[in-house]
Amino acid sequence: MIIRKDEIEISHLENFKGGEKHLEARMYFDGTNRILTRATLIPGASIGMHTHDDSCEVIFILEGRGSILEEGTKKAVQTGDCLYCPKGGTHSLINDSDADLVFCAVVPRQ
């Protein structure tokens, strides 16, 4: 199956998961699993702290830099990094830079 980003409508999600500002994303959902083919956090935006009760998440940073807050620890992230939040894990993604943070993510239910 090929999922073409240009065939997926852009969603503007305000205060996503309780975060700041908004998340702009092309999101594919098959009823069980979610794939963000391309998502952007503008400077100062974040995805709020949340727990993956029935899923994990893999995030690939495509452009920019920011921070991930996981299990109470803040860590810097940048282009080329791959982030993994296991089932039961808690995290947040923050754009605390002065440029867009662009990423893709896969969230499979487990």
Image: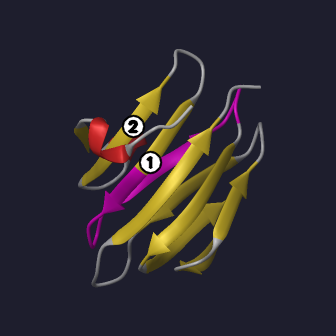
Q: Is residue 45 magenta?
A: yes
Q: Residues within 10 Å of mark 1 (few under 14, many from 20)?
A: some
Residue 72 seen from this side: no
State the SS at label 2: strand
Give the x, y percent position of residue 109.
69, 26
- Left or right of 54 on screen, residue 3: left
Give the x, y percent position of residue 68.
57, 67
Give the x, y percent position of residue 16.
35, 42
Q: Which residues are magenta?
A: 38-55
- Left or right of 45 on screen, residue 110: right
Which callout, 1 or 2, points at the residue further toward the start of the chain? 2
The structure residue drawn at horizontal position 59% and vertical position 43%, both measured from the top left corner, is 106
Determine whether label 1 and label 2 are within 8 Å by CB.
Answer: yes
Disc 1 to disc 2, C-alpha distance: 6 Å
Comparing 63 with 16, the one in front is 63
> Which quadrant is the C terminus positioned in?
top right
The structure residue drawn at horizontal position 28% and vertical position 70%, both measured from the top left corner, is 44
Q: Residue furthest top?
A: 31
- Left or right of 50 on screen, residue 62: left
Q: Is residue 60 magenta?
A: no
Mark number, residue 27: 2
Quarter holding residue 13 = top left
Residue under pointer 1: 37
State the SS at label 1: strand
- Left or right of 73 on screen, residue 13: left
Comparing 71 with 31, the one in front is 31
Q: What amino acid is labelled 1 in the image?
A: Thr
> Which quadrant is the N terminus positioned in?
top right
